[in-house]
Image: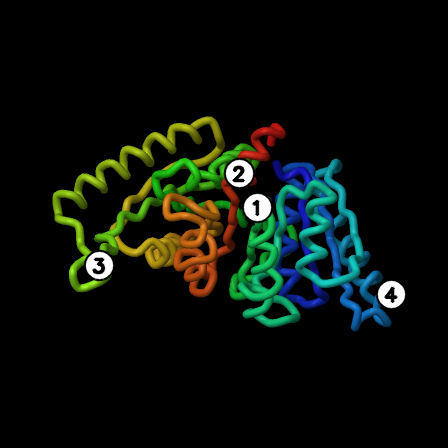
Amino acid sequence: MFTRILVPLDGSQLAELALPYAEELAGAFNSELALVYVCEPVEDEYRHMHQLYIEDMAGTARKRIKGVSSEATVKPGILDGEPAAEIIGYADKNDIRLIVMATHGRSGIMLWAVGSVAHKVLQRISIPMLLIRANVPTPKPGEKGMFSKILVPLDGSSVGEAALPYVEELTKKLESEVILLQVVPHGQWAHTVGGLDYVRFPEHVLESMKTRAGQYLEEVSARLSGTKATLSSEVRLGHAAEEIVNFAKETDTRLVAMSTHGRSGISEWILGSVTQKILHTGSTPLLLVSASGTRGEVERGL
């Protein structure tokens, strides 16, 4: 599942925050780790310097991984063109299974995190992306535990479970605490005589929804029982994005793993209010998995 991992770098220390996470995964899964620098046309005269930089980063990564895995490999590369397009093209051509990116680099947080580069990549790929936040403390070389506590938000739908196979694979190799979270809304938007209003659910309806959510999380938990994970579940009331972010902070979560869309549809779950707010306000590394991408992985035997 994590056999080929891609880390785009831009020469900044901020973009390099992605490396320790990619290295830990590559070491655990004996992966091929591809490090690429995208050289835009205006940088052509500095191409040789970029080549030296990416080769130096690859050499450092090899040394770090060597102590964990003798089978994992590191491959540096220079791409020419527009960053998002080249990253997507490289991933497609090389059967990349995971892209690991810092949430901002040389171009600044709005462009790199949820702007032109990562935004375009998120929109156009079906493979998972692991986004590392700039405000996360930089892991020390060889430090373990980057995936020691994983929060998995679910919404009760099958497409909302897209991240589960990846969490399952992670916890077969790495010891982790996995918390399954479902947020039950207080109400829903409905068309009324006065227009569009937020209608709160009666108390008995909320209690019934909470009960069903708890039962659902127990069923999901049973599917992960064959891993190294320590499992727990939580049902909360409120707005999904706010509760996910707050719960991650309260529990010192190391990774939030979630589907790029669930019951509410892709416009709401990936680039709408839920994930946008998590991207803007969250500080935890975020693994986003496309439901369509998961089906393709399963068909290829992960």
Circle 2: residue type:
Tyr
Rounded to the nearest angstrom, the CA distance separating label 3 from label 1 is 34 Å
Query: Could you classify mark 4 by the number of other residues whose Cα lies within 10 Å: few (under 14), some (14-19), or many (20 or more)?
Result: few
Would you name the residue on which mark 4 appears?
48
Q: Is residue 281 above or below residue 162?
A: below
Query: Could you classify mark 1 by the number of other residues whose Cα lies within 10 Å: few (under 14), some (14-19), or many (20 or more)?
Result: many
Q: Name the residue at 76% across, 48% down.
A: 62
User: Which x, y percent locates residue 83?
Assistant: 70, 61
Task: Decide which of tag 2 and tag 3 comes sooner along the chain.
Answer: 2
Task: Decide which of tag 1 and tag 2 comes sooner along the chain.
Answer: 1
Would you name the residue on which mark 2 appears?
166
Rounded to the nearest angstrom, the CA distance separating label 4 from label 2 is 37 Å
Task: Decide which of tag 4 and tag 2 comes sooner along the chain.
Answer: 4
User: Which x, y percent locates residue 12?
Assistant: 68, 68
Circle 3: residue type:
Tyr
Query: Could you classify mark 3 by the number of other residues whose Cα lies within 10 Å: few (under 14), some (14-19), or many (20 or more)?
Result: few
Task: Please identify, in this view, whether the residue under mark 2 or under mark 3 is nearer the observer.
Answer: 3
User: Which x, y percent locates residue 202?
Assistant: 13, 49
Q: Is residue 44 above or below residue 183?
A: below
Q: Name the quadrant containing residue 248.
A: bottom left
Q: Name the residue at 21% across, 61% down.
A: 197
Residue that extends furthest to the front in the rendered view of this protein = 193
Rounded to the nearest angstrom, the CA distance separating label 1 from label 4 is 31 Å
Task: Decide which of tag 3 and tag 1 comes sooner along the chain.
Answer: 1
Would you name the residue on which mark 1 appears?
128
